[in-house]
Image (cartoon, grey):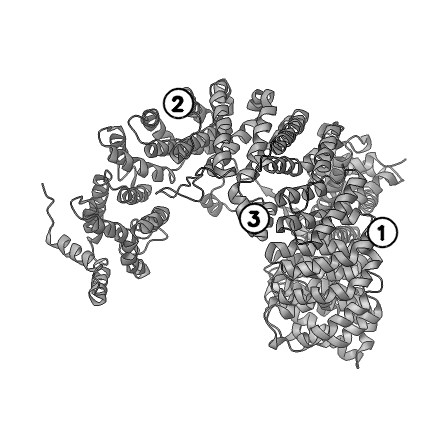
Amino acid sequence: MASIVDQDQQWLLNCLSATLDPNPEVRCFAEASLDQASRQPGFGSALSKVVANKELAVGLRQISCFIMITYLLRRQKFYAFLFVPFFLLHVNNYWSFNSNGGAILLKQLVKKHWQEGDDSFEPPVVSNDEKEIIRRMLLLALDDPHRKICTAIGMGVASIAVHDWPELWPDLLPFLLNLINNQTNLSGVHGAMRCLVLLFADLDDKMVPTLIPALFPSLLTIVSSPQIYDPYIRTKALSIVYSCTSMLGTMSGVYKAETSSLIFPLLKPWMDQFSSILEIPVQSENPDDWNIKMEVLKCLNQFIQNFSSLFKSEIEVILGPLWNTFVSSLRVYEKASIEGTEDSYEGRYDSDGSEKSLDSFVIQLFELMLTIVGNPRLGKVVVVNVRELVYYSIAFLQMTEQQVHTWSGDANQFIADEEDATYSCRISGVLLLEEVVNSFDGDGILAIIDGAKQWFTESQIRKAAGNATWWRIREATLFALSSLSEQLFETEETGFDTSGLKHLVEQILTEDSQIGLLENPFLYARIFTSVAKFSSLISSGLLEHFLYLAIKAITMDVPPPVKVGACRALTSLLPESKIEIVQSQLLGLVSSLTDLLNHASDEALHMVLDTLLAAVKAGHESSTLVENMISPVILNLWASHVSDPFISIDALEILEAIKSIPGCVHPLVSRILPYVGPILNKPQEQADGLVAGSLDLVTMLLKNAPADIVKAIYDVSFNAVIKIILQSDDHSEIQNATECLSAFISGGRQEILAWGSDSGSTMRSLLDIASRLLDPKLESSRSLFVGSYILQLILHLPSQMAVHIRDLVAALVKRMQSAQNAVLQSSLIIVFARLVHMSVPNVGQFIDLLISIPAKGHSNSFAYVLSEWTKQQGEIQGAYQIKVTTSALALLLTSRHSELAKIHVQGHLIKSGEGITTRSKAKSAPDQWVMLPLPTKMVALLADALTEIQEQVLALDDEDSDWEEVQADSIEDDKEFLYSVSTSSGKATNEHLEAMAKVFNEDRDDQYEDDLLSVADPLNQINLANYLVDFFVSFSQSDRQLSDHICESLTQSQRNAIQMVGKSLQF
């Protein structure tokens, strides 16, 4: 019986048809009419009726689906609708797009207009009656035989269900379950499955447990009935199982017993079904088979990751079929991907946007195997077969035909894929092998070596038989070994015998060294990389042979992969090569590398620059001969890539290496200054990034330069740098100019005032710079390096700065209070700390100065500065910075100033109870902190600093009995622990203190160091461990009562740290 179309629906259908009219005026009028109609109540229900009317033309229903998506997005001017005709002209592309993006659009639809009162709600709201119609009509249309319409409808149902189910839509789940269980209506099963897949993506931990008992039996029936249900429906059923087990896994952290009881009854039937699917060998050119198996693998991964304690009894059921899948997939993968003789469906997707490729299936297979190997319970089961696992895994690492094709024509892609560990079977296979070594230790390493030996022998057999692809497995073997080189070396350091590895590597490299550079370029590239990775294992004679070969490869016309490998080998080998070898080859090598720079781009450019840097450093004094050859090329490269931070930094590093070579700094500076001078003096006329980059270049020249070089640079650019800071609004220019000015002061010191025509004018300019950078109104990012600049002023121009100290402190406080950047605040704290040191022995006077300066929101500047300082001390980075601030806190505490006891600062966080802190809970109950007296907090911070150093020493030498961790029960009386330090008149043993100092300095990250300060400031020579020991001895001896009082508020670890100091003192 024909569906009745009322007048309103007929009007809507006419408008929809008119949108396809070739007459643009008719089309535009129809679009405008629909736009107006979409603003009226009932439009959504009318569209849903068109969508559900299976007697209408498919094209009109597709249009309706699309407009249904955009309907409640009309606050966005209905622009999306204007693309309807275009999409209908390309309907397949449209629906492919829509299956990927439609769910997002529908979520926006419901989010904006479905639920009044939501934060994102925009009127008009859909009425309850209209909602009911839309829900009913969409459900009735879920069994539409047109898959793409069905998919769009499923997206709509799932999006609405997030808001309305189950309270306002209680019949949704029973309806979907009825559809799923109706084997006579497979279109309905398809629609329901598609809807459930989307629905489960948005369900929370409350809904999933209630659904699993009702849903999983039906899903098991679908998965186990291939004679009834097509692969698509079975795959979607498995994806729902995956979503549910993922959610249960997330919940198991809090509700372990409940989730285990829910999942346990499901294990056996599902494991049996998974086994039956996996025991069938992987089929060639059958993405449906791959997709079903991939969903099984994903489900298994979730079961093992989250419920392995329940899974061990079932592991034997699944391991055999899983191994069959692993082995059989290799045969298919070799034909389809490695050899390229069959279709691997690379880069193709199904109608839902899921990848169909064989690669994605193999990657998932590796991920599951990695989970099993890394699981302490299940790993014990598979360790007996680890050699076979490694053997087959190496075979998967072979280059695919697609990779060979891509990398042969694109060296940049080859480098990027290698260095960035691009998502691929090769990388996934390496991750599995890494897990084998991590989990199985010696057994894993022996398995790696044994597998490599077997494939090396196999490659020899294939080569002798004339197999043209013999090199692939040889390359894969070297790739596996070189990728694991760091782990293999770490094992060697533990005493494990890796002589077999050394013999194997040298055997492979010796044989492959006879191959010509033009043969098998990817194998030769891997040989070079392996030489670099295993240089410590290889004999010096073989290393020299490959060094010469790499240099030869750079100078020859060989395929790009060979040059890539040669560059990697040279970067690693040159620093350790004999000087005479490097010097004899330097001119030709540098000439060839600079020529490569003219043809390289992107990733290749970085690699060649790294190689050139290694060559310059390895050439030592001989590099003076090639300065005039390298510098112009690098300067031009730097200028053309100044806006690229990576390439410009690489170029600067080479120029800096040239500068450090005796005899090169003067010609280099004379080459650069005529270029950068005009740039800095006319900054407004320069291209973006050129001024900031030129300032970096000048700063590099200034650092550690002789006085005459600093003076020469001063004459050309000093005034220009001053003007840039005072006049520029570009944050990069201001930051770089500030660093440059700091380098000027560090290099010129007092002489900088005499170089200008008027020393007073120069000093005023320097103070003007400080004034602008400390202006509270200036954006924090522009003031980022003001702390380092102020430190240079007070270190190198102390007498000139002394008269301005009060104004400076007041400006520092205001800038610190206005700073919105924690890095800037930390840098200003370091300035205050350095001023504390400079006030010795009159630290109390400096405290009085701070007290006399007001600070907004605080009783005085001292209270404010110390509240921020003690809050951020633990976040300060860099050995120099930590030394200065930590020792300054000790100096402040030693002053015994009366103001110290009046101030309370933030202590430790008060825990607000158990459970997960949600956003709403955090908003209603913000973090609360214990407030501590300032002296207590300062002692706690000093104890924390000592703890960190002690832990670093213990990590290096945990057998040193003098520094064994003190257990809590070893302290009989907390009030006596500080006194234990004072009972010794001697100091901690020099051996321990020197070890602590060495570890502390080495452990700091260089990225936080300011080399201008760390070199120039004598405070950098402080042995912090010795300093802290001296402090605690003096502090406890001078005021036992205060020591006892502070003791009561310290944590156990802080007490332990100071107690360890006491135990190591000499009597």
Going from N to C along the chain, the mark reached first, 3 or 2, is 2
Q: Which mark is residue 718?
A: none
Q: Indicate whether 504 appears above or below 24.
A: above
- Give the residue pinned by disc 3: 407
- The amino acid beneath tag 3 is Trp
Q: Position of residue 4 (x, y in %)?
A: 10, 46
For the point 71% across and 70% down, the residue is 807
Badge 1 marks a residue whose secondary structure is helix
User: Which residue type does callout 1 highlight?
Assistant: Glu
Contact? badges 1 and 3 (CB < 8 Å): no
Judged left or right of residue 678, residue 273 is: left
**Residue 91 percent coordinates (x, y):** 29, 51
Dot 2 lies on which element? helix
User: Tag 3's secondary structure?
Assistant: helix
What's the amino acid at mark 2?
A: Gln
**Quick one: label 2, few (<14), some, or many (20+) residues within 10 Å?**
some
Residue 243: image x %, image y %?
Answer: 41, 34
Q: Mark 3 or mark 1, which is nearer the start of the sequence?
A: 3
- Which residue bears the numbered disc 2? 273
Where is mark 1, residue-wise? 580
The quarter holding residue 269 reads: top left
